[in-house]
Image (cartoon, rainbow, N blue to C red):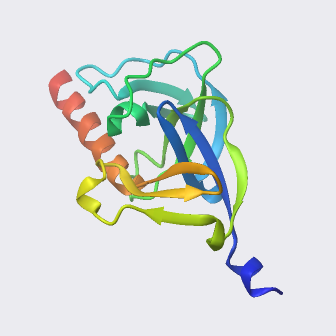
Amino acid sequence: MNATVANDIRGVLIAVTGGNLLLPNASLAEVITYSDPDPVPGAPAWLLGRARWRGWALPIVSYSRLVGWSQEAPVLGAKVAVLKAVGNHAKMPYFAVLTQGFPRLVTIAQIALLEFGDNDADLPLGVYAQAMFNDDQVAVPDLAAVEVQLADALQQSAIAAA
């Protein structure tokens, strides 16, 4: 097997308002059509609510709002990318991100991915890295940081509701 092919990974390019997210394909569980979620009382604006999915109350995140790119609002025909959580949250093995259309499957070759920006302090919370992938500027999300923010927001909401 060619050494470069062995280093290629399957990925998914997810369009959100203000940018594109690049994730390993294994992190995507499913893509569903957006419908108005149940509100989460006292939640920050980036937590759009919870939707029922396969028996879970799935929190839906506006990644664009979370990282400060845009104040996107869900539109007719919007999609939701259901992501597998990377943390050990027994009550939150999945969460979802509002998308603009369907995520696109891609092959990520090391030569096609060029990271830019050398100061992590310049990155918003929730962004692990910024890169050029082929001709697209992409953000590699810090899913662990997003999950921490999400768990904190849900916990604060539960405390406020009690």
Q: Seen in the image, is 140 located left or right of residue 76?
A: left
Of the 4 image quadrants, the one containing the N terminus is bottom right
- Return the x and y of residue 28 as percentages of the image width and height: 61, 49
Q: Quadrant of the C terminus?
A: top left
* On screen, residue 131 above or below 57: below
Viewer-closest of 156 and 64: 64
- Give the percent coordinates (x, y) of residue 30: 66, 41
Instruction: Identify the residue at the far front of this view.
Output: 135
Question: What residue is drawn where x is 42% and y is 37%?
Answer: 63
Say if 36 sits above or below 17 in the image: above
Q: Horizontal and vertical percent for residue 140?
A: 47, 55
Which residue is found at the position 58% from the left and 37% from the top?
Answer: 15
153 vs 48: above or below: below
Residue 122 appears in which quarter of the rendering?
bottom left
Question: How many labels, in total?
Answer: 0
- Residue 111 seen in the current view: yes
Name the residue rendered at 63%, 51% in the picture. Answer: 135
Tell whether 161 sits left or right of 127. Answer: left
